[in-house]
């Protein structure tokens, strides 16, 4: 691929790939336990289960020892985080807030949802990915964890992460004591020297950086591209870029979930199988559990990991965060891991077996689901369209 301009990427980072499961949550707890000054924790879901308790207990310990803890959870996604746990957090000194508690704001405009999953510790360590805080992402002896990824970064880009998180946290209605005023004066530069760029999607704030990253990757890819997508429903422009990339010889592999927690959305994705396969793009379905990953690697040089799904809900209805990594060593190792997952845990869907297993009643359901999802996304686009900014989301 044509490499992005280097001036867009910060150098001097140490980067570690994290995969869903117990090691991921252990890494989060370890990061919280070493915090000395402040923690920003922003996420979509925290369940009232063993995993949710583990993370909350770590945040409580941090607050009790004097660390300033900011805990922001989406009001809609965070319905599984009960009021008594919210009270427990606040009693421990955690500054807690639910993001956009009203589904609609002034002027009959839908509020964006906070979909990103970010943990920032002391402005020195950021963990950014796609995992919510719930048992299904940790797994057990009897049940495989949902497949997802995150990345731990140390280095200068943590300054940018803090800026984004403070922008979402600090609101006019907050008291002076509740506001986040932390700054990072001398970010540490690491010898690993990995180049990264933290990008976001926030339609209301004119930020569509992740979508632009995917479009650029599709447009400039030259050899290969692997995408793992949990809720895959690319728009017309993205489908055109996929088709053009395949026609110029790019080996494209899309990994989807065989089963999904969102059956109607899965059916809508199934409707696109014919288009994908007819354009010589490979489809693999992940079998052991639900695939929740939202990642891509291109030409062994560039990769992206985060919360963004390639669909219009992430484009226009959610606040998302990804880490783009411009590093051949990291990307090649990540690509090897993805290929291993494909070989070990996935089945390929060919055009022949797709036609064989998809009789006309099933295709009709897929088409109906696709039209329904498209209609809902159009309505959402209208309701989240930007008017005069008289209020904060």
Image: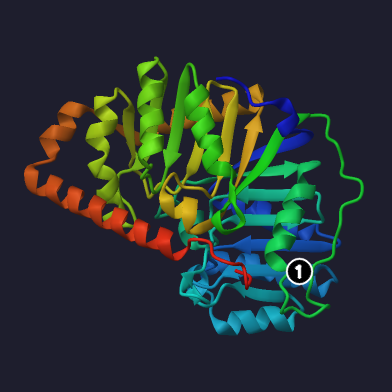
Please give the count of numbered marks on the rendered protein.
1
Q: Quadrant of residue 356?
A: top left
Q: Quadrant of the N terminus?
A: top right
Q: Quadrant of residue 390?
A: bottom right
Q: Is residue 381 above or below residue 93?
A: above
Q: Residue at x 33, y 33 (%)?
A: 284
* Residue 92 image point, x, y percent: 75, 79
Visible residue check, residue 144: no
Q: Quadrant of the C terminus?
A: bottom right
Q: Residue at x 49, y 34 (%)?
A: 215
> Is 296 positioned to the left or the right of 7 in the image?
left
Q: Is residue 297 above or below residue 262?
A: above
Visible residue check, residue 391: yes
> Is 205 positioned to the left or the right of 267 in the image?
right
Where does label 1 land, which residue? 69
- Outermost residue toward the right in this view: 186
Nearest the eye: 26 or 199:
199
* Residue 302 image point, x, y percent: 59, 28
Q: Quadrant of residue 346?
A: top left
* Residue 163 image point, x, y percent: 76, 55
Q: Residue at x 61, y 56 (%)?
A: 205
> Is 164 positioned to the left or the right of 300 in the image?
right
Q: Is residue 183 above or below residue 53?
A: above
Dot 1, crowdedness within 10 Å: few (<14), some or many (≥20)?
many
Q: Residue at x 16, y 27 (%)?
A: 352
Nearest the eye: 240 or 279:
240
Nearest the eye: 303 or 367:
367
* Residue 110 image point, x, y percent: 47, 69
Q: Is residue 325 above or below residue 71?
A: above
């Amino acid at each position: 691929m044509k490499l992005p301009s280097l001036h867009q990427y910060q150098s001097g980072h140490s980067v570690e790939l994290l995969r869903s499961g117990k090691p991921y949550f252990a890494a989060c707890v370890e990061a919280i336990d070493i915090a000395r000054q402040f923690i920003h924790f922003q996420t979509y879901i925290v369940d009232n289960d063993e995993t949710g308790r583990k993370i909350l207990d770590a945040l409580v310990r941090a607050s009790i020892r004097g660390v300033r803890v900011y805990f922001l959870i989406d009001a809609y996604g965070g319905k599984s985080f009960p009021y008594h746990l919210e009270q427990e957090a606040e009693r421990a000194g955690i500054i807690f807030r639910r993001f956009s508690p009203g589904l609609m704001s002034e002027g009959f405009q839908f509020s964006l949802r906070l979909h990103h999953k970010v943990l920032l510790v002391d402005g020195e360590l950021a963990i950014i990915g796609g995992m919510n805080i719930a048992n299904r992402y940790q797994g057990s002896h009897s049940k495989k964890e949902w497949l997802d990824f995150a990345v731990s970064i140390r280095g200068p880009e943590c300054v940018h992460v803090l800026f984004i998180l403070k922008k979402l946290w600090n609101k006019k209605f907050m008291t002076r004591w509740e506001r986040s005023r932390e700054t990072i004066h001398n970010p540490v530069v690491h010898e690993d020297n990995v180049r990264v760029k933290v990008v976001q999607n926030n339609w209301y704030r004119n930020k569509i950086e992740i979508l632009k990253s995917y479009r650029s990757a599709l447009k400039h890819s030259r050899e290969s591209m692997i995408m793992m997508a949990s809720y895959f429903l690319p728009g017309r422009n993205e489908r055109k870029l996929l088709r053009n990339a395949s026609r110029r010889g790019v080996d494209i592999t899309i990994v989807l979930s065989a089963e999904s927690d969102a059956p109607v959305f899965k059916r809508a994705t199934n409707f696109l199988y014919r288009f994908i396969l007819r354009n010589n793009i490979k489809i693999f379905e992940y079998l052991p559990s639900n695939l929740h990953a939202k990642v891509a690697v291109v030409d062994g040089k560039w990769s992206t990991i985060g919360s963004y799904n390639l669909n219009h809900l992430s484009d226009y209805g959610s606040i998302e965060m990804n880490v783009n990594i411009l590093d051949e060593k990291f990307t090649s190792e990540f690509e090897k891991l993805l290929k291993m997952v494909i070989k070990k845990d996935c089945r390929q869907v060919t055009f022949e077996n797709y036609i064989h297993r998809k009789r006309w009643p099933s295709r009709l359901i897929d088409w109906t689901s696709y039209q329904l999802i498209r209609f809902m996304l159009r309505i959402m686009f209208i309701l989240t369209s930007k008017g005069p900014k008289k209020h904060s989301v």
